[in-house]
Image: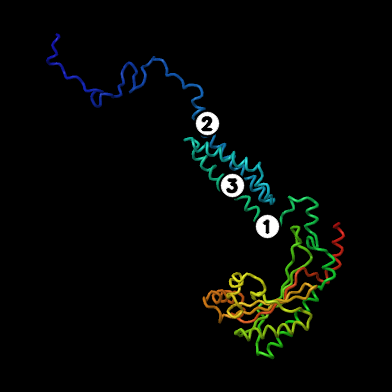
Amino acid sequence: MADSAGAPPVPPPGGYRGARRALLGANGVVGGGRPQGAPAEAPPLPGADARTKSPRTLGWIALAAGIGFVIVALILLGIGAADAFFSPTMLVLQLVVLGLAIAAVATRAGRVLGAVALTVALVLNVGTMGALSTVRVAATGSYAGHKTDKQKLWEAYPGIKDKEPSRFLNQQSLEQLQALADETLADVRAQLTAQYGLQWVKSADAQERPERNGYGGESMLVRFTSDTWATTTPVTGYAHKLEVMRTIESVIAQHGWRGMVAFNDPAGGVDPTMVSKMYGGATPETQVDWEWFSDDEPDPGWFYADITDLANDTTGEYRASREQTAKRTGEPLEGLQLAIVGRYMLSEKKVDDFTKALTKYP
C-alpha cells in the first residue's frame, strides 16, 4: 500500500492544460461561479465609484472654466476693454484655468477634457486676447468705454495740445497756402523749363490729412501736401544740379520764401556717416540724393526740392529702390521733384466752428 509503483505521474505545476473547464452539475456551479446557496460577494467599498468618476468630473470643470474664460475675454474684446486683459483679476483667472487644465490632464479619465481646456487656455490667453483688443481699439478708436467725461471732452479738442490756439487763427490759412503753393510751383517750373529745358509731370495729387490733437482724437487742423511735380529727364552732374537749385532759390524768394538749406550738405553739422547713409555719399559731388528745404516763417509752409541722380549710384541699391517706387507710384525714376507741405492748417471755412469749439475748454 505504501509503494507508489504503478501510480500515475504527479501533475505538473499548475495542472494539466485544459483542466479548468466550466462544469455544470447538481451543485449549481457554473464555470468559476459560486455554488448555489453560497453567500453573495461583498458589495464595493463606499466611495469607490466616486473615486472612479472624480477625474472625469475634474475634466469637465476645467473645460467649463476654460469656456467661461473665453466668453469673458470675447466680451471684453467686443467692448474694447484692452486694459482689462492685463489687470490682476484676468491674470489670476488665467492661472486658475491653467491649473485646472493641468490637473485634469494628469488624470486618466479626465485627460481628454483637460487637454481641450489646456489648449483653450494656451491659445486664447490674456496676452493674445489683449493684443487683439489693443489692435482693434487702435484701428477703430473705440476708447469711449474706458474714458472719463473729461477725457472724452479733450479727445474732441479742436486744436493741438500745448500749442496756443490763437497761433492757428492768426497764421496763414489753408486756402492761402494752397494758392501760394500753386503760384510758387508754377513759377519754378516755368523758369526751369525756360533756362534748362526741363519738362514736367505731376507725380502725386495734393492731399489733406487731419492732424492728431495730442489727446487721442483729431483736431480741426490738417496737414496739407501740394501737388508733387517731377522732371521727366534726369538732372545730373554736380555743377548743373547746383545751378538748378540756385535758380529755384531765386524764384521762390520772389514769393516770400526764405533762403534754402541743403540737408544733404555735411557742412550743416550732421554727422558725415549719417549723411552718407541717408543720401548715398559723404559729399554732394558723390551723393545720389539731394534734399533742399525752405520755409516762409512765421507761416507754416515748407518748400522741398529733391534731386535723385542715379549716375552716382555705385552699388545699384538706389536704382532698385527707385524702380520699385516708380512701379508703385508711376513717378519718374530719377530727376528733380518739387512739393510744398503745411502743418496745422486751419481752413477759412472752419474758423467759426474752431472758435466756438474752443469755448468748451478752460
Judge the density around disc 1: few (<14), some (14-19), many (≥20) Cα neighbours within 10 Å: few
The quadrant of the picture occupied by the C terminus is bottom right
Q: Viewed as shown, does residue 62 lie left or right of 188?
A: left
Q: Earlier in the sequence, mark 1 or mark 2?
A: 2
Q: Is residue 114 left or right of residue 230?
A: left
Instruction: Give the x, y percent position of residue 269.
Output: 66, 71
The amino acid beneath tag 1 is Ala
Q: CA distance from mark 3 to mark 2?
A: 27 Å
N-terminal label among 3 and 2 = 2
Compare residues 242 and 38 and report the one nearer the observer: 242
Disc 3 to disc 1, how far (Cα)? 20 Å
User: Badge 3 local density, few (<14 within 10 Å), some, or many (20+)?
Assistant: many
**Where, by quadrant of the figure, is residue 242 drawn?**
bottom right
**Residue denoted by label 3:** 125
- Local crowd size for mark 2, using a 10 Å CA cut-off: few (<14), some (14–19), many (≥20): some
What amino acid type should be assigned to the residue bearing mark 2? Ser
Q: Please tell me which residue is depicted at 65% across the width and 87% down the height of the picture.
A: 199
Q: Of tags 1 and 2, which is closer to the observer?
A: 1
Under mark 3, the amino acid is: Asn
Cβ atoms under marks 1 and 2 closer than 8 Å: no
State the residue at coordinates (62%, 52%).
131
**Colouring of the image:** rainbow
Upstream in the sequence, badge 3 or badge 1? 3
Q: Position of residue 116 (x, y in %)?
A: 52, 43
Across and down, in percent, residue 333 comes to: 59, 80
Secondary structure of the residue carrying numbered label 1 = helix
User: Would you name the residue on which mark 2 appears?
Assistant: 54
Q: Please, is residue 102 above or below residue 345 in the view?
A: above
Residue topped by disc 1: 138
Residue found at the very far left of the displayed protein: 5
